[in-house]
Amino acid sequence: MMLWTYIKVFLCGGMLCLMGEWIILKTKLTPARILVAYITAGVILSAVGLYGPFVSFAQAGATVPLTGFGHILAQGAIAAVQEKGWIGAFTGGLTAAAGGITAAVFFGFLTAVLFKPKAKQ
Amino acid sequence: MKKQDQQNSAKELLRKQYARMVEKVTPSSKLLEGCLRSFWVGGLICTLGQAFSDLGYRYLSLNSTEASTFGSMVLVFITALLTGIGIFDRIGKYAGAGTVVPITGFANAMVSPAMEYRPEGWVLGTGAKLFTIAGPVLVYGITASVAVGLIYCLIGG
Amino acid sequence: MLKTVKHIGEQTVLLESMPGIIASAAVVGPKEGKGPLGINFDEVVDDPLCGQESFEMAEHMIFRRACEKCIANAGMEKGQVQALLGGDLLNQIMAASLSARELGIPFFGLYGACSTMTESLLLGAMLCDGGYFDPVLCAAGSHFCTAERQYRFPLEYGCQRTPSAQWTVTGAGAHMLARGRGKVRIPMGTVGRVIDLGVTDANNMGAAMAPAAADTILHHLLDTGRTLADYDQFVTGDLGAVGSRLLYDLLGKNGVELSGKKHTDCGLMIFDKDQDVHAGGSGCGCAASVLRGYILPNLEMGHWKRVAFMATGALLSTTSSQQGETIPGVAHLVVLEREA
């Protein structure tokens, strides 16, 4: 059972990355644009109700890629709207995604304090 | 006026011809190899995320949403560390989208400019440049989520 | 058009007093030091930071040291050099300006992207020939780490380079020109026009610059009435593998058959194939250091008698490319001749 979950995670996560690579190589989009495209696609797919079932199927295979980040933002906004009304549209998204963003800011800053960039060989 | 149009179209033609010449001699990236590499590295990163979130669920008494966030946070931490010691760029060079698409790509996009711009000072260097690549991601992600929330409010709420 | 004896055709200048290169020096980074020309350089720094706080300051150190070594190689003092012409790839040519601040030599700052070396040689030779300044120091430099950050991504950012991408050379070259002296002389040169055939891919600089190189060669031959046979070698700055192929194709279309036998590219000389630099080296420092490490030795030892040396530059800025502009290219040509 557990092994089957991990296989699903590997395959689905891998496929999302493969698609990204294909788009980069075929369209010459920069990685930054891919990130933006993925997160926006995640928000939209989640809003129309497609990403939720994908998350219950693929778990981390769907939440770790950036589309999953978009899904968290969208679900957070929707849940907060249900709870608090229109103000939730402004508070819900970032509240739900706070963990990942805060971790990235905090560890990013910490790393900059501790390390210096190295020249490539 | 007409003469200028002719000149312009001649210039366009020259540019098109040259674009074809360039396309012919420019080597393209290996599509299959690139896709395979990003597939297995990306898949592995997601599997690691699943493992961390399972650990969080089982041993740290987190609920399933928290556990999933925990998994992502551990990946962010590992990315920051690997970026700091100068290994992440090599993995990224091998895997391409395999490291860009997962949350590791987001983390690397924040950590690497934060380190790079340290000589320009803590505030305008590290502090500001932290968001150079990752900022747009947040802008579009947040904007889209607000739009979704408002639409939901109007039609469903 | 101004008609004088010093100007032939549309773009070519004649330098009657034959200014010559009386001394040279090149300082390069560790990767360049491991390349095939490594032993020919005056100094290989083993730390890309050169003990400085930032890579920008390191680039400036390398630039300054190349200038100082060149002055020493010429057996001169700083005060004897009448003018310094130089540039680099940093915004507002910081490395060259800071070096000029410390050297205290009257300074002309130049920006020609990777074409800066021949731009400075050509202008320097004209200043010498005109009798305005003599001797003149011409220099150019670049640094991989500063160019990456300015034009591409932070060093620790994990992304792939396309096969047509080039590797910016860490290094600087300085060359002292004096009127009527030196083993290698500059009898003429051709100023390039800015040519743009619509390339937008910043990872394919060779393709953006090849049309400018072809244009300059064709005008040079037209202005002088010479043919390829008059030269032992055509040396371009940093067209790389892709740009060199395109140069042959573009010249071929105009009935000039150049091939690998008579053409060398500095970007293909400075690194070994297994150094993972994709289409080759680039940057102002590439042509500047290869001139010291390969072209001048070949001329001095008599392997070549007359060479057309042409550094090529892609005149893009990050702003222009973000605003969707295409990449303009330029190439300046100087003729290098061994004094019989």
Image (spheres, rainbow, N blue to C red):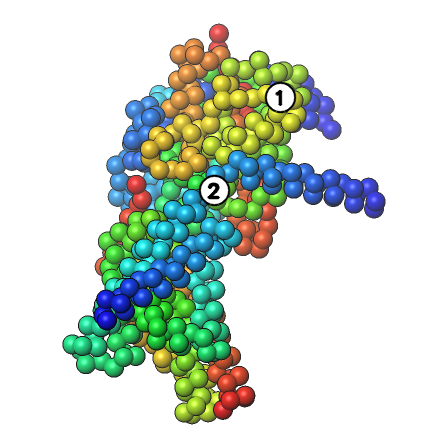
Q: Which residue is mark 1?
A: C256
Badge 1 marks a residue whose secondary structure is loop
Q: Are marks 1 and 2 in contact (CB under 8 Å)?
A: no
- Front in this rendered view, residue C78 or C27: C27
Q: Is residue C129 above or below residue C93?
A: above
Q: Along the horizontal axis of the image, is A114 left or right of A49?
A: left
Q: Which residue is mark 2?
A: B28
Nearest to viewer (mark 1 / mark 2): 2
Q: Position of residue B29 (x, y in %)?
A: 44, 44
Q: Position of residue C162 (x, y in %)?
A: 44, 44
Q: Position of residue A48 (x, y in %)?
A: 49, 78
Q: Is residue A8 above or below residue C303?
A: below
- Front in this rendered view, residue C221 or C85: C221
Q: For the point 59% across and 29% down, which residue is it? A: C249
Q: Is residue C332 visible?
A: no
Q: For the point 59% across and 20% down, which residue is it? A: C257
In which chain is the residue bearing label 1? C
Three-letter amino acid code at disc 1?
A: Val
Q: Position of residue B157 (x, y in %)?
A: 49, 91
Q: Residue furthest left?
A: B59
